[in-house]
Amino acid sequence: MDADPEDDLTRVADAFGTALREYYDGDGPGVYTTVRDDGKRTKADLSHYFDSHDEWESPTKQALTYIRPGDRVLDVGCGSGRHALWLQEQGYDVVAIDQSQQAIDICEDRGIDSCSVMDMTDLQFEDDAFDTILVVGNIIGLGGSLTDISGYFDEFDRITTDRGRVITDSQNPFPDGIEDSAYFRDNQIDDRDASTVRFRVQYRDLVEDWLEIAMLGEDELTTLLEDTSWSVTETIETAPGDGWYSVAMQWYFAVIDKN
């Protein structure tokens, strides 16, 4: 019997954080791998997590212009802190959180004043603590269901003021011009313009547990929020396949305001 290639891998909670830390310290190759549950493997470049504002993708720059003067900002899933650090330099009061201790250590090293280890599923903040919440990296779909996404917005409602705003991104799983959509059709959610992707991060001989993320088109996001206190007010589209994320369908940003 052939050996299982996973026998040589070590299960860890934060392979991504290890990759990020080693790259930041100059000890790592700057590349990790996402492994989809159908076996597809995609290399991802860590250097983008440290890009300066001038190097950001145009949609990201445009999305952050929707953060209003004087807003108190929560950066959810901050990673190495590229967005939070820039916002802090612009004079914003910003709090950065990530579930990775190693990511938060990097944020502290880079000079972010307020950052802590915290999961988006357990936001430990007082009511009305923020004006704008930034959720970038497709993680708004973390958990893999539309119910999970609605639940996040219920909690965002609690921790934002009356002028609450959420700036987030997702990917349309069924865009025109992309032929490699069979996987997403196989994982479509209830015949809706939404799908799930199941993957995990591998770095060197380290591998994380499986993650599941729901991706949904812009119209589907609008529909999903109809039963919440939020509504989409602006969208920023990219061409199908653009963007440096390992899932490259049709990436977009949404600006979502409290009703």
Image: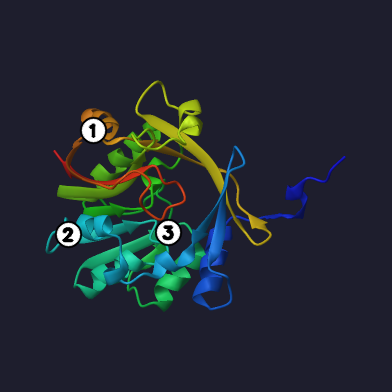
Query: What x and y, as percent, mark residue 189?
Result: 42, 26
Residue, disc 3? 98
What residue sits 49% from the left and 74% below the top?
24
State whether residue 243 is above or below residue 196: below
Q: Residue furthest toward the right?
A: 1
Tell me the quarter of the image containing the N terminus: top right
Q: Earlier in the sequence, mark 1 or mark 3?
A: 3
The amino acid pointed to by label 1 is Thr
What residue sits 20% from the left and 61% below the top?
72
Q: Earlier in the sequence, mark 2 or mark 3?
A: 2
State whether residue 188 is above or below residue 211: above
Q: Nearer the viewer, residue 232 or 195?
A: 195
- Residue 65 got which mark? 2
Q: Nearer the viewer, residue 223 or 96?
A: 223
What residue sits 37% from the left and 67% below the top?
81
Cα separation between marks 1 and 3: 26 Å
Residue, disc 1? 222
Q: Earlier in the sequence, mark 2 or mark 1?
A: 2
Q: Nearer the viewer, residue 236 or 146?
A: 236
Q: Are marks 2 and 1 in contact (CB under 8 Å)?
A: no
Cα separation between marks 2 and 1: 21 Å
Q: Is residue 17 left or right of residue 85?
A: right
Q: Is residue 64 left or right of residue 135?
A: left
Query: What x and y, as percent, mark residue 248?
Result: 41, 46
State whether residue 159 is above or below residue 101: above
Q: Residues within 10 Å of mark 2 (few under 14, many from 20)?
A: few
